[in-house]
Amino acid sequence: EVQLLESGGGLVQPGGSLRLSCAASGFTFSSSAMSWVRQAPGKGLEWVSDINSSGTSTYSADSVKGRFTISRDNSKNTLYLQMNSLRAEDTAVYFCAKPLSSIYYYGLDVWGQGTTVTVSS
Amino acid sequence: EIVMTQSPATLSLSPGERATLSCKASQSISSNLAWYHQRPGQAPRLLIYAASTRATGIPARFSGSGSGTDFTLTISSLQSEDFAVYYCQQYQNWPPLTFGGGTKVEIK
């Protein structure tokens, strides 16, 4: 069964840091690009960051650029999101997700259950 | 950045009725559009990709149409499990990938 399991969320003060992890299983992780998508309380979906299968190319939303870093360890089948200089507006459920195809982007067909990040003093 | 606009914000319908949801892109995205739904407390689920192709396991009552800037998701006969929030997403020009604001389909 294809599965993604996020961890690492929690309560952090403004300006603080947090590292999210996403453990993948049931598919060839090293062949798949991966994404982080977040959802603020009561709001819609917001794309955060993408990484290619080898980890050599990354892309991030302007709202997190320079503060968040996406990375991966293919030997551990794990995706990461290092979050620095956190702000109240970063409060959200963070989902990791896998694209449907490794050849052409068609959308995200596997999602984790999400991990909650709360930024508050 | 391509802006995706969904309408209506809320759709109040009864089980068995037909639902028609709209998604408009601020510029042409060809057929590079996906639809998701999200039930409360759950992760989103991919329903449709390439504007009109159903994802694996998605019932035939879900259909997508459109190209360019105007897209439609149709649910032919609403089932209880279909009451949820629906999002469209473009992947023509990214970064950034962009989602619409969502349409909530609620029970009337």
Image: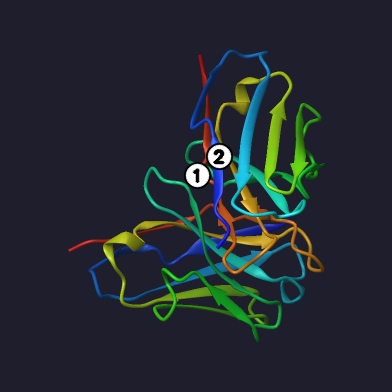
- Quadrant holding the N terminus of chain A: bottom right
Front-lying residue, A101 or A72: A101
Which x, y percent locates residue A112? 58, 56
Q: Which residue is mark 2?
A: B6
Nearest the viewer among A107 and B89 is B89
The answer to whether residue A16 is above or below residue A39 is below
Q: Chain of mark 2?
A: B
Question: Which residue corresponds to the image point at 58% horizontal and 46% vertical from the top-left?
Answer: B44
Q: In the visual, does A103 lie left or right of B94?
A: right
Q: Which residue is mark 1?
A: B101
Asked if the residues shown at circle 1 and circle 2 are in contact, with their CB atoms under 8 angstroms apart, the answer is: yes
Position of the C terminus of chain A by quadrant: bottom left
Q: Residue furthest left?
A: A121
Compared to residue B39, the image places residue A48 above or below, namely: below
Instruction: State the image quarter where residue B20 is shown.
Output: top right
Label 1 neighbour load within 10 Å: few <14, some 14-19, many 20+: many
In percent of the image, x 65 and y 86: which residue is there?
A56
Q: Is residue A61 above or below residue B18?
A: below
Residue A51, numbered label: none
Q: Earlier in the sequence, mark 1 or mark 2?
A: 2
